[in-house]
Every structure is written in structure tokens, then in C-alpha cells.
Image (cartoon, rainbow, N blue to C red):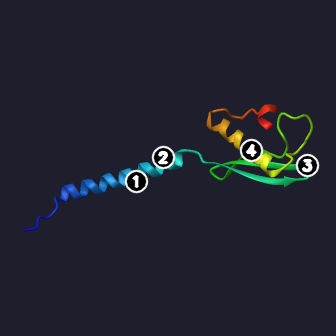
Amino acid sequence: MTTKPQPRRTWAMRLFWVLAMGLMIWLYQASPRYSLRTYLTSAGWGYDILRNNVPLIHQPTQPAVVGRLGFESEEHARRVGERAIAKIRQGQFPPTLSPADLK
């Protein structure tokens, strides 16, 4: 003998899953996603920090250095940009970088 599921129970489970999926989507969109893009300039390398694919910081030169010097390599620009993103995630905006952070 088979029993049919209770209509209320099925309806409640569907509502639960819809609400759970909605909450997951809302939480995913509420948390900013940061990404880094490096590029070559006439002075060396620079980087852009993007929040949810929207430009947030455009850094064509080395911060905390006198003059308008670009980064020596793409790897150097990427390393410093990742430190800046780490400071933003810690709540520091704008991210202040010292000469020690540039090494």
C-alpha cells in the first residue's frame, strides 16, 4: 500500500528550498568580490583593483615612492596589488601601503 505525501508537507519543503536558495544568492551578491588586473605602462607595470568587476583603484605607479615610477615587473605589481586587496578586506580603505609593503 502506497501513501501519498501530504500536500502541506510538499508545499512547505518547496518553500524552504526557495527561501534557502534566495538567501544563498543574496549572501553571494552581498559580499564584494575583488580582482586584480595588471597592465604595462610607459613607466613600467601598474595594476587595477576591481570590486565586482567595477574599477575601484587605478594604480599606474608605485605608491609611497617619490616620483612616478612604475613597478619593475608584472609579478611585483601583482604582489603589491594583492597586499592592497588584503588591506581592503581588513576594512582599510583606501589601503595605505608603506615602502616596506612594496618589497
Upstream in sequence: badge 1 or badge 4: 1
Upstream in sequence: badge 4 or badge 2: 2
Residue 65 coordinates in the image, percent (x, y): 87, 35
Say which of marks 4 and 3 sits in front.
4
Which residue shows up at 87% across the image and 53% down it? 41
Which residue shows up at 92% across the image and 37% down it? 67
Which residue shows up at 37% across the image and 50% down it? 20
* Residue denoted by label 3: 43
Tag 1 secondary structure: helix
Q: Determine the CA span between mark 4 and mark 2.
A: 28 Å
Upstream in sequence: badge 4 or badge 3: 3
Locate the N terminus and report the quarter of the image it occupies: bottom left
Give the amino acid type for the residue marked by disc 1 in the picture: Met
Name the foreground residue: 2 vs 19: 2
Upstream in sequence: badge 3 or badge 1: 1
* Mark 3 crowdedness (10 Å alpha carbons): few <14, some 14-19, many ≥20: few
* Residue denoted by label 2: 27
Q: Determine the CA span between mark 1 and mark 4.
A: 36 Å
Q: Determine the CA span between mark 2 and mark 1.
A: 10 Å
Tag 4 secondary structure: helix
Residue 89 coordinates in the image, percent (x, y): 62, 38
Give the amino acid type for the residue marked by disc 4 in the picture: Arg
* Mark 1 crowdedness (10 Å alpha carbons): few <14, some 14-19, many ≥20: few
Residue 26 placement, left or right of 59: left
Q: Determine the CA span between mark 4 and mark 3.
A: 18 Å
Q: Which mark is residue 21?
A: 1
Say which of marks 4 and 2 sits in front.
4
Give the amino acid type for the residue marked by disc 2 in the picture: Leu
Give the amino acid type for the residue marked by disc 3 in the picture: Ala
Image quarter of residue 14: bottom left
